Every structure is written in C-alpha cells, then in structure tokens.
Image: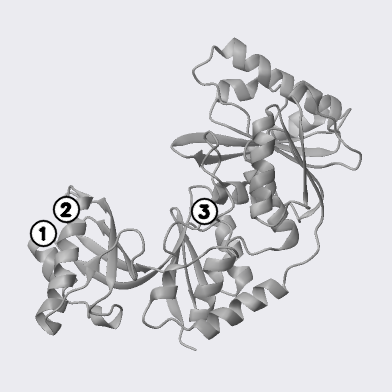
Amino acid sequence: MELITMVAKTQFGLEEVLATELRNLGANDVAIHNRAVSFKGTKALMYKANLCLRTALKILVPIAKLHALNEDKLYKAVQTVEWDKYLNKDGTLAINTSLKSDFFNHSHFVSLKCKDAIVDQFRDKYGVRPSIDLDHPDLSIDIHINSDEVSISLNSSGPSLHRRGYRTDSTLAPINEVLAAGMILLTGWNGEGNYYDPMCGSGTLLIEAAMIARNMPPNLHRKQFGFETWKDFEPNLFAQVKEEAIAEMRESKARIVGSDKTFKAIEITRENATRAGLDEDIIVSNKRFEEIKGVSGGGLMIINPPYGERLPIEEIGAFYKLMGDIMKKEFDGFDVWIISSNLPALKKVGLAPSKKITLFNGALECRYHKFEIYKGTRDKRKLQAETPENTVE
C-alpha cells in the first residue's frame, strides 16, 4: 500500500511523546518539529493515528507546497492544485489559515482568497461550485504561510482530536485531554499500580489515565473524523482498523483514585467517566487536600493545583507549602508531579524537583515538576536534583 507523508500537530513539550506514540503505531520516517511530528504511513495508519494517538491535536496530509508574495499570486498558486481529486463539485469545504509572514497580514482574508481560487476552479470546469460549511465540511483544508512559502494540507481529523466526546463544557478552566494524556505519558507510567489525582476537577486526568491503563483508543467514541467524508474514504478498511484497535484493549491493572474539595466536581467527573465508559475504573470522593491519605506500595500522583497568580505569594505559597508537607507525610514511595504557571509558589513546596519540563496550559507557560517522595533520603535527592543536567528553566 502507498505510503503517505503526514504531519501530526501537538502542544509544545509533547513532541517527543507523540513521536514515541507514532513509532509504536508503526509509522516510518518519524521526525520531530516545533509542536509537530512528521511521519510516513499507509492510509490504514492515518485512520489508526486519528483513532489511537493520545497527544495529537490533528493529523494533516500535505498536498502542495507553493510560493506567493501577494494575494494575486496566492490565488494563482492555489489554482494549480487539482481540487476535484479531493472534493466533489457539489461538496462543502472549510479553510483554516495560520500565518508567519511579512507578505500576508490577515489569516481570514487569506482563507477567503484561497476559497475563491478553489470554487472558481470548479465553476470554470463544471459550471457549479462547492459551498462553505464551517461546522461539518466534506473537506477541511489547512493553509500555512511561512514568509512566501505556502503549505496546503488536508485535515484528516476534522475538529481537534482533544475533543474526545466525554467531557461537558460546564467546568472551569480544565486541562484539555491532549495535555492531560501527555502529562501522564511524560511520567513514564506503565498503566499499572496506584494512580491518584487529589484535585481532579472535571476528571480529565483520571479518565485519560484509565484509558491508558486499558489501552483504550482515546477517540473510540468520536462521532466522525474528517477523513470519513473524503472522496477516497474506505469504510471497510476503517472498520478493520477500529476492530483491531478494540481487540488490543486489556483489563486495567491500575487503581485509579481521585478526589476534589467540591462535590460538583465529583459529580461532573462521574458523569464524564460514565460517558467514556470508564466509570467502573475510577474511584472518586469529595475530600479537601488536607484530608487525603496515601496508600502502601507507592505509585503516581499528578496535581494540577490553583495557580493563584493574582493572589499574594504568601497566600498561594502557604497552600503550596501545605501540598509539600502532605506529600512528605502521606505519599512515601510516590512520584508526585505538579504543573503550575506560578514559579514562586512552586518553590514553596519545599522539595527539590528531580525533573522540570516546560508545558503550556492554554496560553499559560507552566513548569511540570517531578518530586520523588522517599522518607529519610531528602538530602540525597536534593543533591541529585541540583546537578546541572537536572536543572531546566
């Protein structure tokens, strides 16, 4: 089967994780870029990548690389593509444009110019033209302009792959599903043993952990992918890919526990877990952080605490100090990871991190710190953590 060149988009800091995922799926020529990973694979791999990748936002299929210095040249360049190979004359399309260019200033205007080029080609050739559908297009087109270089790709995913379909929109500032999965995979967790989230919010980290534990494809319940409305879509091949992915699921060997100080958060977590089909895999309870207790055998704990950047450092710092005290007292044998955009507050935890990673939660630049909790070895751990190779800012 013919190999296709593809690009998987992701968030900053998750590129290595995504590259590993792609290699595990059988991708060829995997190469890491800024917020993206390029690779080659068959059409079946494109289907599987959309279904199974946890840290991809979308899978693009590049179809043309052109050059243009102004709108007229852009129009003519886009018309060099044979668009009826990808779209029926009575089909629908949507265009998303991103720019990094001195020659083009407005992404919306570029999208309109590219749209005109495409529909005019159909009108001249067939006497009819495709129409725009921003919500459910037959073909979603990505235009990226870097200086005078115009890259045109087809978006095989449709809406962003972080929209797994299990989460409601009724929670405040949740971590998105791709970041949550990436945070878990960055820890090296193997999907077994104890996993604890003491500030679970809407349950995104818990649900992504449960999916990893069961090897469940994260987009198994997605209603439709972009490629399903393409002219060359093979439903039987996709059905086979889906069947094989389901066959690779396993029984969970993890104890996945979460808690939150608000009962509403617990209710939402339970609703979301039920929608994901994972309500029996997750245990949640209504507890303040001060009330949480560790379990024997160690494990993994990930905390997404309030960042409190508008609060006095004394106030938010006191809470972060409390987190550190409880970690030391209750979670011997655990690897505890904390994400926060508040670096002064993170220092109040009172433990030296053994690893520091930069991630973005939305527009907020954050540090993701690992703390290894072992009683009686704090000084040794601190010494190790302060060696140059472990210092990342």
Q: Residue 313's x, y, as percent?
A: 57, 13
Q: Earlier in the sequence, mark 2 or mark 3?
A: 2
How far is mark 2 from mark 1, CA to CA? 9 Å
Q: Residue 143's x, y, as percent?
A: 28, 61
Q: Identify the residue shown where x is 67% and y is 18%.
A: 319
Q: Which residue is mark 1?
A: 71
Relative side of 2 to 88, left or right: right
Of circles 3 and 1, which is in front? Answer: 3
Amino acid residing under circle 3: His
Badge 3 element:
loop
108 over 155 or under it: above or below: above
Residue at the far bottom: name it.
1
Badge 2 element:
helix
- The mark found on residue 162 in the picture is 3
Residue 73 visible in this rendered orientation of the protein: yes
Amino acid residing under circle 1: Glu
Q: Identify the residue shown where x is 89% and y is 27%.
A: 376
Q: Residue 307 sits in which quadrant?
A: top right
Of circles 2 and 1, which is in front? Answer: 2
Q: Which residue is mark 2?
A: 109
